[in-house]
Amino acid sequence: METRSKLLLNIRPQIPSAKIYDTMSNDEAFQNKTLRPIIKMQHDLLIAVFRNYIAKRKHVFYDLTLPKQMAYIENAIHKDMKFRNSVKGMIIGQFTVEEYELYIKNSSALNKRMMNIVKERLVDSIQLFVKPEYLKAV
């Protein structure tokens, strides 16, 4: 019988550019070995969650200019604690027990790295956040 840890590790995508070197800090190694693959794997869910976040806030996002949309994403990730904690839970829930034990040793710094990666992915995917009525026309 396969363990939860082994199953979790098997479903994670490989990121060849996320190298791990002996000279890296523990936080950077954790970021490249654990956070980046999990966040990549959770990408579609993160997009869906942010679309729901936009809808719950009366679609204000769609009326903003591109720079303001980027600021909106950053504000959601860094300032809205309820949303931030929800996103953290989606990522932490994919940790193995061993990774969680590493995470809790320096959770504050790792949370910053985690949220910055999520913010980058959402900003890089900003074209996916279009008004719902535009989707019907296609």
Image: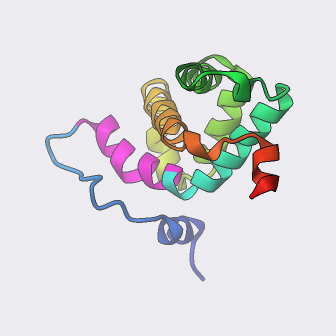
Q: Quadrant of residue 80?
A: top right
Q: Nearer the viewer, residue 95 or 15?
A: 15
On the image, the x and y values in percent for residue 88 come to 62, 37
Number of residue marks: 0
Q: Farthest residue toward the left?
A: 23
Q: Nearer the viewer, residue 135 or 124?
A: 135
Residue 30 drawn above or below residue 8: above
- Which residue is rendered at x = 66% and y = 41% of the image? 129
Q: Nearer the viewer, residue 39 or 102?
A: 39
Left or right: where 19 falls relative to 37: left
Q: Find out whether residue 34 is within the magenta segment.
A: yes
- Which residue is rendered at x = 30% and y = 38% of the image? 28
Q: Which residues are magenta?
A: 25-39
On the image, the x and y values in percent for residue 132 come to 80, 44
Q: Find out whether residue 102 is within the magenta segment.
A: no
Q: Nearer the viewer, residue 19 or 1?
A: 19
- Which residue is rendered at x = 60% and y = 83% of the image? 1
Q: Main secondary structure of the magenta part?
A: helix
In which quadrant will I find the C terminus? bottom right
Residue 75 drawn above or below residue 56: above
- Which residue is rendered at x = 30% and y = 44% of the image? 29
Left or right: where 28 falls relative to 104: left
